[in-house]
Image (cartoon, rainbow, N blue to C red):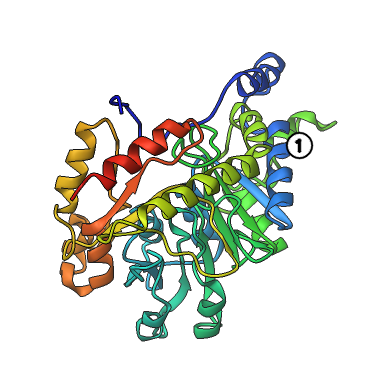
């Protein structure tokens, strides 16, 4: 087959998204306003929660979640050792301590059997990550640690769920990303979800400098001389209405996007089952995967080629790959600050060394998937 060039991910955007930006641009209401509110309403409905609050990205969402829950210096928050660094960084922003928990190499998610031994009187919350679009086992987390606040890091998990319960409705707060590598995107952008009215009100103020009323309320109200009260230190973590307008269009395509990705994920799994050294994604029964990425696991004890050499080989064929993500405990800052060795979290270490994401996105065509499968099957 003729050589193709297939990126690891591409956002699926076009004329509808382009046209959606006209209204905020020509209305003059560009910062957080009616389009953000519409996006929030649709997101809350899709994820079966009372409140959805849009912010500038998922990292700021995680930070706001920590602040809203009162996480502070001296507190500890459990974090999977295999995740994007912002999961741990959000805890550090509050001068609290992220305590790493190993992960299950089958799911890449937090190993629930390792949670209990990490809990002490200083432990206040846990951030299970729905990595690559597969929900963590939140029910088991609740059973093991019913007193801990649960913040779902659903950066990759828009539209994912367990049974009829969507991601973002499983814990106390959910946090989502709309980065271009996610299934739906606003360029940058994030969302918090919750069913707790008090948390929602607090997050709403925190994202807007701590203001007691929103910009929209202030500018459209009948008393132009009124300024908001500021009873807390807040942040400027707002989403723009241009992003909100794009988000409305993208969100309406979410289930179509996931259905298409599911179809091709099934294709990968069926065809690549013939490769004895490549472990395809594991999905527990009743779980709905969001398929932000298709992440496999290279078993180097059986493979004729090491993971890194394999990735270089595929790159030469025009197939982009990436490690799933990184083991945060192995990153320089965290390894030094907490005196952690790579072997302290063997599951996360293995995922760091042997996970491999292959292209799966909505701009790919049948020939792209066939080309990737043929390239992997040809390695003997």
User: 184 or 71, which is in the foreground?
Assistant: 184
* The quadrant where residue 245 appears: top right
Picture coordinates of residue 350, whole percent (x, y): 23, 65
Q: Is residue 240 left or right of residue 127?
A: right
From the viewer's perspective, tell me whether residue 340 is left or right of residue 43: left
Decide if residue 224 is in sight here. no
Q: Which residue is mark 1?
A: 217
Please name the residue shown 47% across and 31% down the image. Answer: 365
Which is nearer the eye, 330 or 59? 330
Give the quarter of the figure containing the N terminus. Answer: top left
Instruction: From the top left corner, tell me how far across and down residue 4 is, in percent.
Output: 32, 26
Answer left or right for 252 relative to 243: right
Determine which quarter of the picture holds residue 320. top left
Residue 208 coordinates in the image, percent (x, y): 59, 42
Q: Nearer the viewer, residue 3 or 218?
A: 3
Which of 154/319 is in front? Answer: 319
364 is higher (above) or lower (below) than 191: above
Q: Residue at x 64, y 17 (%)?
A: 25
| Residue pictured at 49% horizontal, 67% vertical | 136
Residue 32 in view here: yes
């Amino acid at each position: 087959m003729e050589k193709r060039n297939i990126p690891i991910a591409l956002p699926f955007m076009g004329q509808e998204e382009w046209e959606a930006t006209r209204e905020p641009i020509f209305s003059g209401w560009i910062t957080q306003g009616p389009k953000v509110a519409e996006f929030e309403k649709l997101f809350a409905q899709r994820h079966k929660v009372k409140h959805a609050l849009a912010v500038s990205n998922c990292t700021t969402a995680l930070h706001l979640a920590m602040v809203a829950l009162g996480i502070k210096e001296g507190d500890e928050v459990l974090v999977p050792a295999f995740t994007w660094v912002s999961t741990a960084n959000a805890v550090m922003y509050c001068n609290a301590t992220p305590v790493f928990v190993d992960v299950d190499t089958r799911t890449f998610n937090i190993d629930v059997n390792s949670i209990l031994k990490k809990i002490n009187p200083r432990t206040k919350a846990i951030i299970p990550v729905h990595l690559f679009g597969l929900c963590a086992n939140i029910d088991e987390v609740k059973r093991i640690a019913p007193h801990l606040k649960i913040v779902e890091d659903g950066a990759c998990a828009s539209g994912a769920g367990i049974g009829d319960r969507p991601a973002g409705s499983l814990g106390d707060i959910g946090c989502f990303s709309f980065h271009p590598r996610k299934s739906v995107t606003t360029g940058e952008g994030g969302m918090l979800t919750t069913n707790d009215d008090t948390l929602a009100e607090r997050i709403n103020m925190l994202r807007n400098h701590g203001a007691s009323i929103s910009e929209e309320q202030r500018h459209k109200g009948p008393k132009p001389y009124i300024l908001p009260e500021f009873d807390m230190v807040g942040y400027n973590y707002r989403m723009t209405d241009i992003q909100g307008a794009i988000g409305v269009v993208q969100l309406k395509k979410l289930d179509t996007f996931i259905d298409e990705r599911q179809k091709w994920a099934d294709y990968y799994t069926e065809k690549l089952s013939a490769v004895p050294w490549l472990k395809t994604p594991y999905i527990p029964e009743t779980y709905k995967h969001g398929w932000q990425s298709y992440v496999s696991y290279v078993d180097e004890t059986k493979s004729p080629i090491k993971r890194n050499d394999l990735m270089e080989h595929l790159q030469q064929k025009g197939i982009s790959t990436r490690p799933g993500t990184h083991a945060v405990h192995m990153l320089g800052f965290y390894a030094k600050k907490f005196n952690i060795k790579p072997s302290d979290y063997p599951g996360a270490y293995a995922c760091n060394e042997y996970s491999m994401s292959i292209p799966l996105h909505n701009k790919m065509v049948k020939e792209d998937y066939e080309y990737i499968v043929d390239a992997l099957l040809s390695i003997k």
